[in-house]
Each structure stands twice: as structure tokens, then as C-alpha cells.
Amino acid sequence: MQPQTSQPLFVRIADLVKGKLFGNAQPAATTTPTTPPPVTYSARGQTFNPDDVAQLKKIIFSEVSNRDVPKKTLEANVIFNTALNRMAAANTAGQKRSLSQVLTQPNQYQGYNSPLYQRYDNPGDSLTAARKQQTDSIVDDMVKQVQGGNFKDNTNGAYYYKHVGDKIYYDDKKPLFANQ
């Protein structure tokens, strides 16, 4: 003998969705996925984003990967600061530029598009990979300083710099974005 039930043996999906089988059950509320706000950073009034940071890493890698860590850190700060100073000057002049645009501007940073710049994405050997990791760590530390409000301009507002031996000199005579 079969037990008697008040529920039908076959269920229509439409009835299940409408809650007819289980009283007045309502379907779960659906949520519309929201896009998180874009990540941005701000240093001395200049705003940049993670794509700009990725470009900064490549430029710094191509410019300083052959130096020891203290010199690499010093020059990385110089590169980042000169780029921020160039952004500020361009923006003040009504020529808004992103950090990436400043870093990749023709004739601004020698490492841009160099063979070493190209190797950043595919280091190929353990020494180059270790240098890339050092560069990434240095840049990540600078970004943390920016986030904490502790990133200082070690160039005193310079747009350009040059090396003479082991020293860095700031060039305040060269016009902004010269030799384009």
C-alpha cells in the first residue's frame, strides 16, 4: 500500500518558482553586481592608477636594474618624482597628462621601449627576474608611502636629472618636454 500524500508526485517548475508548493515562498532577491570604484592614488595633487604604477615599474626597471639596491631606490624615487613634477607642470599649463603619458613621452626617459624595458614582461633568466622583483618591491614601497602621505620629493621640484659618476644632478635649465 502506498502512503497517501497531499503533494503531487510531479511538480511543475513554474509552480515551484511561484511558491505554490511551499506556501508563499518567494524567490531569492537578485542583486545586480556593482562595479567597484577604480583604484586611484594621489601624490602632491597628481592622481594615478594601477596601470600607471605598472608603467612606472617598467620604466624604473629599464633605467636602474643594473644598480645596487640603495642606488636603485634613490633613482627610482628621482624618476617617480620628476614624472610627478612633469605631470603637475603639464596640468597647470592645461595639458593634462597621466603618469603613463609622462613616462612614455618621446625623449623623456631613456629606458622607455629599450630592450631592457621589453624584458620586464619576460625576464628570461633568474638574474633579470630577481632585478625585476627588486624593482617591483621598490615601486610598491613608494606607492605605500604615497598612500600613507609620506612620499617626499627628493628632487626639489626638478623635471629632469642626470648622472655624473655616482651622483645625481637635477637639471632645472631644460624646458619641460623638450626634444619632442
Image: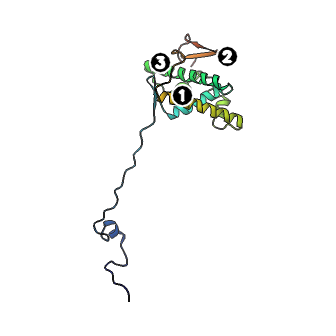
Residue 45, compared with residue 172, is above or below; it is below
Alpha-carbon distance for marks 3 and 2?
28 Å
Tell me the quarter of the image containing the C terminus: top right
Comes first in the chain, label 1 or label 3: 3
Residue 59 tag number: none
Q: Residue at x 71, y 37 (%)?
A: 126
Q: What is the number of callouts on the image?
A: 3
Q: Earlier in the sequence, mark 1 or mark 2?
A: 1
Q: Nearer the viewer, residue 75 or 52?
A: 75
State if disc 2 and disc 1 touch (CB < 8 Å): no
The residue wearing badge 1 is 142
Mark linked to residue 89:
3
Query: Residue 29 sits in which quadrant?
Result: bottom left
How far from the left and from the top, in percent, is residue 120?
Answer: 64, 34
- Marks 1 and 2, how far apart at CA: 22 Å
Residue sitting at the far left: 24
Q: Quadrant of residue 46?
A: top left
What residue type is disc 1 on?
A: Met
Which residue lies under the disc numbered 2? 166
Q: Nearer the viewer, residue 73 or 170?
A: 73
The N terminus, quarter of image: bottom left
Callout 3 touching callout 2 (CB < 8 Å): no
Q: Relative to 11, is 92 above or below?
A: above
> Gap between marks 1 and 3, in whole Å?
21 Å
